[in-house]
Image (cartoon, rainbow, N blue to C red):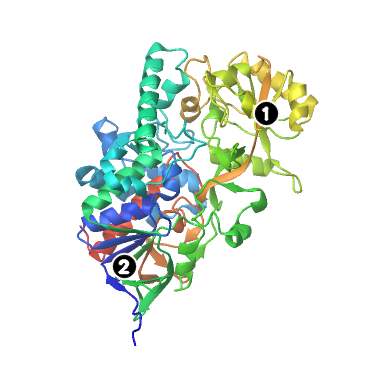
Amino acid sequence: MTTNTPAKYSFDVIVLGSGAAGLSASVTAAGHGARVVLIEKEPVVGGTTAWSGGWIWSPRNGPAKRAGIDEDIDAPRAYLKGVLGNYFDAKRVDAFLEAAPEMVSFFESGTALQFDGGFPIPDTYGHIEGSGTGGRSVIARPYDARDLGDDIKLLREPVRETTFLGMTIQAGADLRAFMTMTRSIKSFAYVTKRTLRHFRDLALYRRGMDLRNGIALVGRLLKSARMAGVDIRVGQTVDNLLITEGRVSGVALSDGTQITAPQVILACGGYPHDEKRRAETFPRDKEHRTLAVDSANGAGLALAEAVGGHVRTDLARPAAFCPVSTVRWPDGRVAQFPHIIDRGKPGLIGVLANGQRFCNEGLGYHDYVEALLRATPDGTPARSWLICDHRFLRRFGIGVVRPQPLPYGHWIKRGYLKTGRTPEELARACGIDPTGLSQTINDWNDGADRGEDPAFGRGTTPYMRLQGDPEQQPNPNVAPIRKAPFFAVEVVPGSFGTFAGLATNEHAQVLRADGSTIDGLYAAGTDAASVFGGFYPAGGINLGPAMTFGFIAGRHAATNGTPQ
């Protein structure tokens, strides 16, 4: 008679999840001498990171210093203190600010992850003391996925909504070339070359191989993990954490396999798809639409809670908000488009059902949703419309609708893009008050003719001006809305991922409700409560802490807290 004995494996560090935090932790721990296994329940790696813009907020980073931007730690600390107010956690903020440049240097010095600097990118709130005007963010350099070899099959595909036929386009010079290809011979040549290469890759590899944004970050981290000897196991689900003599000592998989290690790092993607937790923490949860991958369902939080971990929900907001529009494709697929870029361009405004503006559209995407939630009365759906004219649509596009020379009529037929020959006709097509919208556009145009936005001050900070169009003067964020026909896209509250999460300390160790540490257990990324307290002080504040606290967790776990 034979019995099936569960398989057992032993490592120094176990990492659960393969987004930025999990991959960062894995590569860091392996780079510090640990034997590391990374476990991912999906058949591909990358998590929501693979769908992101890829920017990483990391003040005082190496690329910035090499470009001559060398600031003292007190400046970003003062800025965060001004933004976070009573939610400022000095120990965790200082740990982040001290480790962020170390994280960048670690990856640059010995891995496949190399960075470009975001030298012109300012922080969101330019009026707050210590705000940066550039250099505080980095992004993974474009990556040729052919370098991954057979591991390309492990890489998550980018989403259709934010790509051009699967081709990722990076904010900055790359995006600017696509936006100006009909007005610049140089841009046209650049776009033609990139597009032809992409079509070649589709024919040869059935996917894009010139990776940009978050997918480039994941590709480079995946290569780095292989180089460091990380054992990557996909398609495996963890049922529970193992406990030995009061400390976490490994994991039990759903197939009975046990993997032991004195250190376990949770980086499972937070709880965007955990219906129960969302209902308990999200404002207007039933109306909310997430941009996160389906596998981000709170599994990491549940594993930690089962061994005494405490979930913090006492943040200013539970998630990183972003206005989204719902896209329905001909094949029946329904997805969400994140409105990150279009809101700050000149010649677009956001209005409520009464036809009135309610915020400065050029501020951060998190701020737009915050304002929408505040402006919407109880019992009324939290929805708004982005309004523009024909000139704007053809120059910039709106939502998933691309600028010229691509056609837009099919989006009208599908109901995504509303249109009207007059503002009143557009209003009736959307269910907006016609008189209110007409008056709002008239008021906007009065100020726009002078390059001003008297109501909300569009274009008055470096962050807003960067989102605009430098060819539009005197204000890159303000232009009239006059050229018929007129267009609108409905947008509602959405989010990239959760801010609420497990309580952790400055070493990324998971805490109990009484503040004591759970030996052997760490959390990073959106499994951990945001170091920024539920605020969105700059672009890249999801991936910045994910990469940095993944680095902190990996280093601490591999060295048992011994300084390196």
Vertical order, 334 against 241 (above or below): above
Q: Earlier in the sequence, mark 2 or mark 1?
A: 2
Q: Specify few, some or many for label 2: CA neighbours under 10 Å numbering under 14, 14-19, or 20 or more.
A: many
Left or right of 465 on screen, residue 355: right
Of residues 555 and 333, which is closer to you in this image? 333
Q: Amino acid at mark 2?
A: Gln
Q: Quadrant of residue 26?
A: bottom left
Q: Amino acid at mark 1?
A: Lys
Of residues 131 and 387, which is closer to you in this image? 387
- Residue 45, horizontal then vertical, whole percent: 38, 51
- Secondary structure beneath dot 1 equals helix
Q: Quadrant of residue 217?
A: top left
- Residue 560, horizontal then vertical, whole percent: 25, 66
Q: Specify few, some or many for label 1: CA neighbours under 10 Å numbering under 14, 14-19, or 20 or more.
A: few
- Residue 97, horizontal then vertical, whole percent: 34, 48
Residue 94 seen anywhere in this rendered image of the structure: no
- Residue 289, horizontal then vertical, whole percent: 60, 47
- Secondary structure beneath dot 2 equals strand
- For the N terminus, give its image quadrant: bottom left
- For the C terminus, give its image quadrant: bottom left
Q: Which residue is mark 1?
A: 413
Vertical order, 515 against 96 (above or below): below
Residue at position x 52%, y 58% in the image: 297
Of residues 399 and 476, which is closer to you in this image? 399
Q: Which residue is mark 2?
A: 263
Residue 266 seen anywhere in this rendered image of the structure: yes
Rounded to the nearest angstrom, the CA distance separating label 2 from label 1 is: 54 Å
Residue at position x 34%, y 34% in the image: 204
Residue at position x 38%, y 41% in the image: 215
